[in-house]
Image (tube, grey):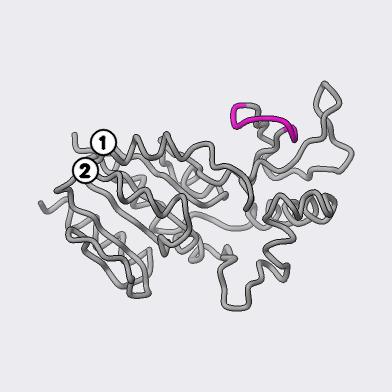
Amino acid sequence: MKKIVFLTGAGISAESGIKTFRDSDGLWENHRVEDVASIEGWYRNPQLVINFYNERRKQLATVKPNRAHEVIAELEKNFDVTVITQNVDNLHERAGSSNIIHLHGELTKIRPVDGEDYDAIDIGYEDLSINDKDSRGVQLRPHIVWFGEAVPMIEKAARVVSKADILVIVGTSMVVYPAAGLIHYAPSGIPIYLIDPKPSGLSHPRLKQFVEKATTGMERLKKELLDE
């Protein structure tokens, strides 16, 4: 069974109604990105950050996976599929994908401020409070990888990409490192697809781009893969 690795970004969840933070105004849900998505922002004003992610969790509870998420899950019937996502939502899980690597953390989880990925606690769509602490009395924080922090899952993701038979990039500009560097781990000679409504400046000899939104692009890709 061929291994397909998907690299997904904000563009795949935008069609479900989740706003991206890379809009032209530099704001994410009317907040400066550096205030709510950086480690400095957390140290400056943890209450603001906690409130922000509580709101994002409430929003996530109101949206659903779209057809792009569903098609990726459906491809597990014919391929060995791994999803490497930059998104912190759980729409891939809810669509039925079973093998997902979250590079930037998960919105529905929290962890101690001194904790690692494996210390994460699933709270679903519940609120986190500034007074919430673990059994040791250590403050709990959103399980999000912020700007200024290491990306602990990047090495695992690179290993997965290095074993791919097909690489598919969906809804991401591939300009933010370290995630953008994952394409360089793809084995030479494998097909690489890019699905995004904006023409990409990405240059790669084996790259085939579908210049369209994720939902229609994934339907088109599924047909092409199954027809081969």
- Identify the residue shown where x is 34% and y is 56%: 169
* N-terminal label among 2 and 1: 1
User: What secondary structure is found at the residue carrying circle 1?
Assistant: loop
- Residue 64 place in picture, x, y as percent: 53, 55
- Reply yes or no: does residue 116 show up in magenta: yes
Tell me, for residue 163, which label it has, or none.
1
Residue under the image location 60 percent in, 32 percent down: 117
Say which quadrant the N terminus sits in.
top left
The circle drawn on residue 95 is none
Picture residue at 18% right of the left edge, 58% below the top: 206
Q: Is residue 35 left or right of residue 25?
A: right
Nearer to me, 76 or 185: 185
Q: What is the CA distance from the residue labelled 2 to the residue labelled 1? A: 7 Å
Question: Label 1 is placed on what type of residue?
Answer: Lys
* Residue with the most extreme right position: 131
Magenta segment: 112-118
Q: Is residue 149 above or below residue 206?
A: above
Left or right, residue 127 beside residue 119? right
Residue at which label 2 appears: 187
Q: Is residue 125 above or below residue 133?
A: below
Residue farthest top in this picture: 136
Residue at 64 percent of width and 52 percent of height: 61
Contact check, label 2 and label 1, Cβ < 8 Å: yes
Q: Position of residue 87 (x, y in %)?
A: 52, 52
* Quarter of the rendering containing residue 165: top left
- Three-letter code for the amino acid on which mark 2 is drawn: Pro
In the rendered image, residue 73, in percent from the top left (x then y), is placed at 36, 45
Badge 1 density bin: few <14, some 14–19, many ≥20, Cα 10 Å: some
Residue 164 horizontal/vertical position (percent): 25, 40
